[in-house]
Amino acid sequence: MYIIPVKSRRSEVVTKAIARTINQLDPEFRKSMTHDNGVEMANHKWLKSSRL
């Protein structure tokens, strides 16, 4: 589990912070990620497409 500090709950801010963190992980660990349905995850499709 990771706790990622963010400056706001805006979806763009949250998903970019998550993308930076995920892209530092080994690809094997990127295969599964869960999230809740909060408004901060409204940009989840962009996050999925931004992963390497």
Image: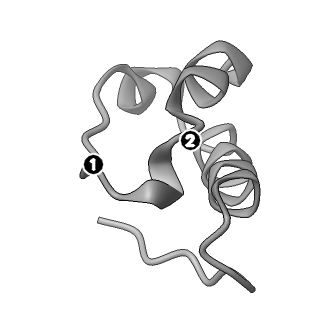
Pick whichever, 1 or 16, lies toward us: 16
| Residue located at (64% from left, 49% from top) | 15
| Residue lying farthest to the front in this orientation | 39
Q: Image height check: is 12 above or below 8?
A: above
Picture quadrant of residue 2? bottom left
- From the viewer's perspective, is residue 36 above or below residue 9? above
Decide: marks 2, 1 in contact (CB < 8 A)? no
Q: Quadrant of the N terminus?
A: bottom left
Q: How far is mark 2 from mark 1, CA to CA?
A: 23 Å
Looking at the image, is mark 2 or mark 1 earlier in the sequence? 2
Instruction: Tell whether 27 sits left or right of 29.
Output: right
Residue depicted at x 68% and y 37%: 23
Circle 1 is placed at which residue position?
A: 37
| Residue toward you, 5 or 27 | 5
Above or below: residue 17 compared with residue 42: below
- Say if 51 sits above or below 22 in the image: above
Q: How many marks?
A: 2
Secondary structure found at label 1? loop
Label for residue 25?
2
Query: Along the horizontal axis of the image, is 3 left or right of 47?
Result: left
Q: Assess disc 1: are there few (<14), some (14-19) or many (≥20) residues with their C-alpha within 10 Å of its C-alpha.
A: few
Q: Quadrant of residue 28?
A: top left
Q: Amino acid at mark 1?
A: Asn
Image coordinates for residue 32, horizontal then vertical, percent: 28, 27
Image coordinates for residue 29, horizontal then vertical, percent: 38, 32
- Expressed as whole percent of the image width and height from the top left, the position of residue 52 reads 70, 16
In the rendered image, residue 42, in percent from the top left (x then y), is placed at: 51, 42
Label 2 element class:
loop
* Left or right side of 8 for 31: left
Q: Residue at x 45, y 57 (%)?
A: 39
Residue type for callout 2: Leu
Q: Identify which residue is drawn at 55% across, 75% down.
A: 4
